[in-house]
Image: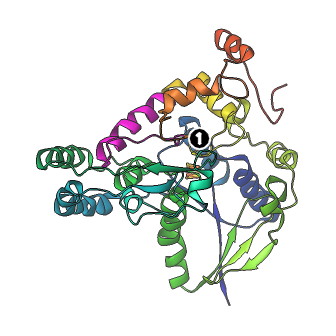
Amino acid sequence: MEKIADVMSISGGKDSAAMWIYATKELGVKVIPVFADTGNEHPSTYEYLDYLERELGPIRRVVPDFTKQIAKKREYVINHWPTKLQKDIPGRWVSVEPEFEGSSEEDLTLPPSTPPIDIYKTYKGVTGWIWEPTVKGKSFEEAEAIVSRALEHLHPTGIPFLDLCIWKGRFPSTKARFCTEWLKIIPIAEDVYFPLLEDGYHIVSWQGVRAAESPARAKLPMREETPEGYEVYRPLLNWSARDVFDMHKKHGIEPNPLYSQGMSRVGCMPCINVNKGELFEISRRFPEEIARISEWERLVAGASRRGDSSFLPALDADDKKNIHDWVEWSKTSYGGHTYDLLKMISLEEPITCSSVYGLCE
Ligand code: SF4
């Protein structure tokens, strides 16, 4: 008889929790719930995962480790940076957001990118592309100082998200979203999927996506076979957000408390895709998370060749923003030039329950 393993990725968010409740309580399917720990989650999410374990059963926790990659990077820095840093870097057009997936700061300097437009006609008016003038090579002493600063910071901390960024010399961004791949997809595949496949299991991978979330998700089928040899099942495809919370309520399981605290999604705190309102709520309610990201910016900058790095990307070459600058921006009204009076007043008031899903009565 074919051996079947039902595997689902649990994030601590409402959809994956509802899917686990549905599988366990309504279908009686014994699933393998897997949580990939990015180290960039809010403490409430870790507590919530403990709560889910007490209610539904053990969760397989996967913790990505970048010790080897950081050790290799140290070798690279020692052997190659001194020469590279002393060479001139020719001027070039670069995308404000690098396009290539999984890029490290090494990829960002070579090869020169090609602007997608006629640069002479549209030099002033194009957003997304900037001209980086020729950078003169460093002196021997300057190069030595940069190498020694990087080596001082190139050590694993044991926090997966931070170690990934220390290794890459930069933070991920919406266009170079290497975090999902390195913090979730690869570790779960290596720790869970590959061993199960080797043991002869047919894997059914449960995905808690809903069609209402985006036009791309609306096109996904309920079931499909992947080229990697496992089956994907999306039982929540036709569910609404209300259905998801109803599933929790029906079986007496609380949703993650962050939903009652103004968060529209649960996952990294913050995610690189954070929107203005979420960033405002995070800074207002959890200033310690902003302080943590600020410290991470310092550490990643220290490990990078350029000596600077920000969690959220700059809007243009002269507009470098760190996380505190972005928090200030999150307090502004549309256009970003003046403070939003209502937001400023709310900063003075005690924090009350608020939920984008109407969870607060
Ligand atoms: S996309 Fe967002 S939630 Fe996903 S790993 Fe990256 S930062 Fe975390």
> Residue 5: percent from the left, percent from the top?
64, 75
Horizontal relation, residue 348 to residue 358: left or right: left
Which element type, helix, strand or loop, lies under badge 1?
A: helix
Q: Residues within 10 Å of mark 1 (few under 14, many from 20)?
A: many
Horizontal relation, residue 107 to residue 229: left or right: left
Q: Residue furthest left?
A: 141
Q: Residue furthest front?
A: 120
Task: Look at label 1 and name its amino acid.
Answer: Thr
Identified at 74% across, 23% down, the residue is: 353
Horizontal relation, residue 305 to residue 183: left or right: left
Q: Is residue 265 visible?
A: yes
Residue 99 position by quadrant: bottom right
Of 88 and 351, nearer the camera is 88
Identified at 23% across, 63% down, the residue is: 76
Q: Residue furthest bottom?
A: 1
Q: Which residue is mark 1?
A: 45
Of 3 and 195, nearer the camera is 195
Q: Is residue 60 visible?
A: no
Horizontal relation, residue 256 to residue 49: left or right: right
Residue 119 position by quadrant: bottom right
> Residue 304: percent from the left, percent from the top?
32, 48
Quadrant containing the C terminus in the rendered view: top right
Q: Magenta span has 170?
A: no
Q: Magenta span has 290?
A: yes
Q: Magenta stretch? A: 289-314
